[in-house]
Image (cartoon, helix red, strand yellow):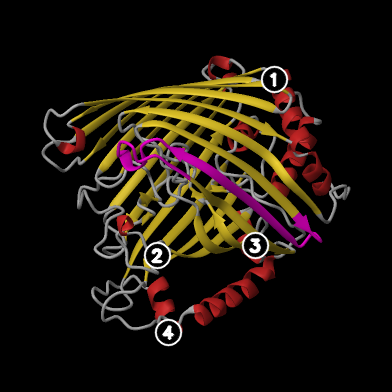
Amino acid sequence: MNKTPRNHKLLVMFVATVVLLFAATAHASANIPIDSPFYTNLDAIISEGLIKSSLSSTRPFTRSEAGRLLAEAIEQAEKEKISSFSAGFLKRMSKEYKDEISEARAHGSTPDTFIKPVEEFSISCNFLDGPHSVFNNEGIDYYDGHNAMAQFQSRGKLWNVFSFYIQPILLYNQKLENIDGNNDTGVSLHKGYVKFSVDNFEIEAGRDSIWWGPGYHGSLLMSNNAKPFDMIKISNPRATLLPWILSWLGPFKYNMFLSELDEESASGHPPDSKLFGLRFDFKPHPLFEFGLSYLCQFGGDRPGIGSLSFSDYINILFSNECRNGDKRDSNKEFAIDVAITIPNVSRILPLAESVKIYAEWGGEDAGYPPDKRAYLLGAVLNDIFTLNGVKLRSEYANLSPSSAGGAWYTHGWWPMKYHGRIFGHHAGTDSDDLFIELSQILENKFSYKIGFDKERSGISQTNTQEKYQYFFETSYDIAKHLNLAVSYSYEEINNYENVKDRKQNNHFLGMEVTCDF
């Protein structure tokens, strides 16, 4: 047996002692799910210059941090003139997080202990005609034919120290694994965790998703493409300043987690493999933020490999030396990302009210510095042509390094997969992806998205697969606490599965009804 739990505890205790040096007031609070519209709505408020301390590239946020940011936006909105659209937008978000806003203002209206047995309930039905691509949905698998899902979310807080979140799902697949007659219905705990919070230190244990980087359509290292991880995560939920001259780096946040991966053969790594992640976010200027991300996959039950000592863990996590065949061998990825927001663009050029430009650059672990590089570039035009609520987004990712096209997410022992899905960018190895989306929110009740995505995979192969996807999504609040969302997507694939002249046309039709309490 691999006797490592004691070592895990020692590492966690050491890091916890260090991060407590940067403590500030905070409160126990559940996370806001990564797929929540909160994040795109918050970006709209940030783009207007109402929030200057937000670090937006690491998700999820806690509800407590959301309350602090919205309190900052409300205070700023009282000092300057904003559009009626933005005012209405902010008012609606403030109602949803009114308790957290009051808590941030030190009014203390939020009870120290409460339980919401059902905070949100939803039912969705999805029909696939062909093997349509489904990604960035936290690893939930849909197959050719009819699929249905019901889920609810529950959260609570105990004595303002502990918090918890539970999200079970009931999933029906008409043709499980695309096999006729292989219908399946199952219940599982999709996400669920408990958190302990003291001052500005938080430790979370359970199952949850993580997104690192400013990307919207994908991220190089961590996204919600795969299932939520079973992990222990340590973080400071509230942005804070580092001491001494390091304060010039501005608001600072960190994330650190350790996960034991799945044992499924589809993932390709040894049973009981470990995944360690570390991220730092900084905002030295209200319009500029940058982050550093690091992943290390290692360990597991491999033939002829002994157990790991504490010093082995240190060597694995913080050494760049390649150790093929050694018990300290590992697979590492590293990324740097930046995001710049430019407000009041319309004063110079009536193209948009504000523009956000972002980029992410990453490398695999071969070489020093890493030489197998991938990158992501994106831009967002908010209120394009000064039309309220209209947003145009473009994003391009390249995961086919010239030095080794198939390097990313692949490894002889530790491919970057969880339950068969890549937990970085969904396009996968040896690929690139171009994404364009036009969206609008009307009267804060009705919204739509129209988009196009071109993805090439197997770029270094003779027959590169080319996938073209066209989609439309719409959402409408049919009542105060009831929302209806409908989506349709058409997909055309050339050289399907890298076979010359093989074509595939797929369709996706989905509908979801959500009720919040």
Question: Which quarter of the image is occupied by the C terminus?
Answer: top right
- Callout in the foreground (2, 1): 2
* Nearer the observer, 219 or 117: 117
Disc number at residue 242? 3
Dot 2 lies on which element?
Answer: strand
Report which residue position mark 1 lands on: 85
- The mark nearer the N terminus, 2 or 4, is 2
Do tag 2 and tag 4 residues touch (Cβ < 8 Å)? no
Q: Which residue is mark 4?
A: 309
Identify the magenta region.
Answer: 157-185
Dot 4: what SS? loop
**Residue type highlighted by circle 2:** Cys
The label nearer to you, 1 versus 4, is 4
Instruction: Name which residue lies at 27% across and 71% down.
Output: 322
The reply to whether callout 2 and callout 1 are in contact (CB within 8 Å) is no
Mark 3 surroundings within 10 Å by alpha-carbon count, few (fewer than 14), some (14 through 19), many (20 or more): some
Residue 513, position in %: x, y?
60, 28
Residue drawn at (71%, 57%), measured in percent from left and top?
A: 163
- Image coords of residue 474 (percent x, y): 54, 21
Tag 1 and tag 4, C-beta contact below 8 Å: no
Q: Secondary structure at mark 1?
A: helix
Q: Earlier in the sequence, mark 3 or mark 2?
A: 3
Choose between 484 and 211: the one closer to the eye: 484
